[in-house]
Image (cartoon, grey):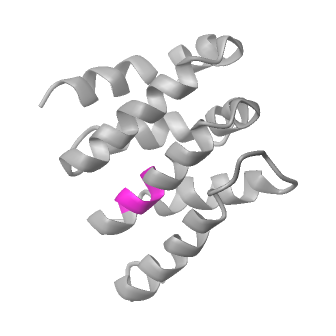
Amino acid sequence: LIMIRVELGVICVRGLYNLTCVDISYQFIERVIRALVSLSMSGAANVKHLCAAALCNLSDLKSVRPRMVEEGAITVLTTLSRGAETRTRRVCAVILQNLSAAKSVRVEMASRSSVTAAYGLSSD
């Protein structure tokens, strides 16, 4: 849908973004994470940025960080580090920092190419 109708995709991603504007985790939040991870692979720059912004919101929730890593957030960061807009790359760097603050996921992050993502984000 997003590849065919970009304007609809942006509206849908904004809806998902709104679901991430929370102070605490809620039941089924992993569905939102999964959708954002999937949609962030879209070709549209504005969709990628909205997905990154929503993932950034979620990365601020300590209880959600392990689930984000499990659902593929590191893969998204690695992909976005290779060509997304500068503003999106900055958001990705914040996500990486937030996720790495959780000691419980550091080993898994390293095994899922977070070092590659960090290097890609730091080199313009």
Against 35, residue 96 (above or below) is above
Against 100, residue 66 (above or below) is below
Residue in the image at 71% along x and 14% along y: 104
Quadrant position of the C terminus in the picture:
top left
Residue in the image at 34% along x and 22% along y: 118
| Residue at far front of view | 23
Q: Is residue 45 magenta?
A: no
Which of 18/112 is in front? 18
Residue 66 in view:
yes
| Residue at far right of view | 27
Q: Is residue 50 magenta?
A: yes
Residue in the image at 37% along x and 86% along y: 7
**Residue 120 location in percent, x, y?**
25, 28
* Range of residues picked out in magenta: 48-52
Q: In which quarter of the view is residue 61 placed? A: top right
**Residue 12 location in percent, x, y?**
53, 78
**Residue 27 location in percent, x, y?**
87, 54
